[in-house]
Amino acid sequence: MFDTMTLTKIVGGFCGALLVYLLGNWAGEILYHTGPAGHGDGEHTAGYVIETAGSEGPAEVVEEISFGEVFAAADAGKGERVFNKCKACHKVEDGANGTGPHLFGVVNRPVGTAAGYGYSGALSEVAEVWTPETLNEFLENPKGYAPGTSMGFSGLGKIEDRANVIAYLDSIGG
């Protein structure tokens, strides 16, 4: 049934596989040595140290910046660039609703009054008018500010970005 050549090929295949395995193991030991054998006294230190909350240095105090100060220095041009994140759902043309309501003249407009848009109702429960301050709070975390809102955007984390977007929205239809 088996001739000598077939048996030789099978044994050679097993020997070749064993050789590849041993060479890989040897290369791995050289690259990622985990034990003390062959490396001096055996204590190895990590290549980097991860700082933990229990560090000895004094805690850095984050100074709270008021939104009014940031909004006073806001740049509508930068806000237009940040508004690109909003363009998927909102339009700035008057009356042109998209997935979300149009934002033409939204600053100081009563909440939930964009003509032709069906609101979820969650916004009118938390605010009456879209002042710059209420827009700031809403844009920071829409779902946290108005639970139940249909807005799926996670929010703008930087206060400067929020102030710039609100300045841009105030400049178009204010």
Image (spheres, helix red, strand yellow):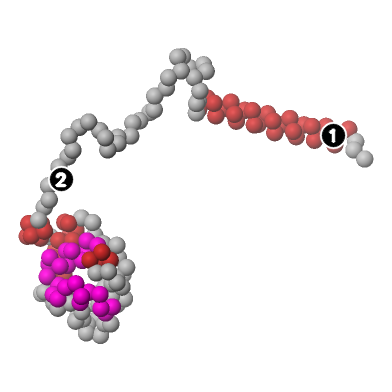
Label for residue 30? none
Front one among 150 and 82: 150
Q: What is the quadrant of residue 147 in the picture?
A: bottom left
In the rendered image, the vertical position of residue 129 relative to residue 69, given as above or below: below
- Looking at the rendering, in which quadrant would you find the C terminus? bottom left
- Residue at x-position 24% and y-position 60%: 156
Label for residue 62? 2
- Residue at x-position 22% and y-position 61%: 140
Is 24 displayed left or right of 134 in the figure?
Answer: right
Tell me if label 2 and label 1 are in contact, CB under 8 Å: no
**Magenta span dominant secondary structure:** loop
Q: Describe the element under mark 1 as helix, strand or loop.
A: helix
Q: Can residue 86 be seen in this view?
A: no
Residue that numbered label 1 is attached to: 7
Residues in magenta, as a range: 119-141
Is 155 displayed left or right of 109 in the figure?
Answer: right
Front one among 75 and 61: 61
Please state the horizontal and vertical placement of residue 126, each as a whole percent of the image: 19, 72
Please state the horizontal and vertical placement of residue 38, each as a whole percent of the image: 51, 16
Q: What is the quadrant of residue 113 in the picture?
A: bottom left
- Residue at x-position 16% and y-position 73%: 127
- Residue 43: say if magenta: no
In the rendered image, the vertical position of residue 95 relative to residue 43, given as above or below: below
- Residue at x-position 26% and y-position 35%: 54
Is 54 displayed left or right of 134 in the figure?
Answer: right
* Residue extending farthest top: 40
Q: How crowded is mark 2: few (under 14 residues within 10 Å), some or many (20 or more)?
A: few
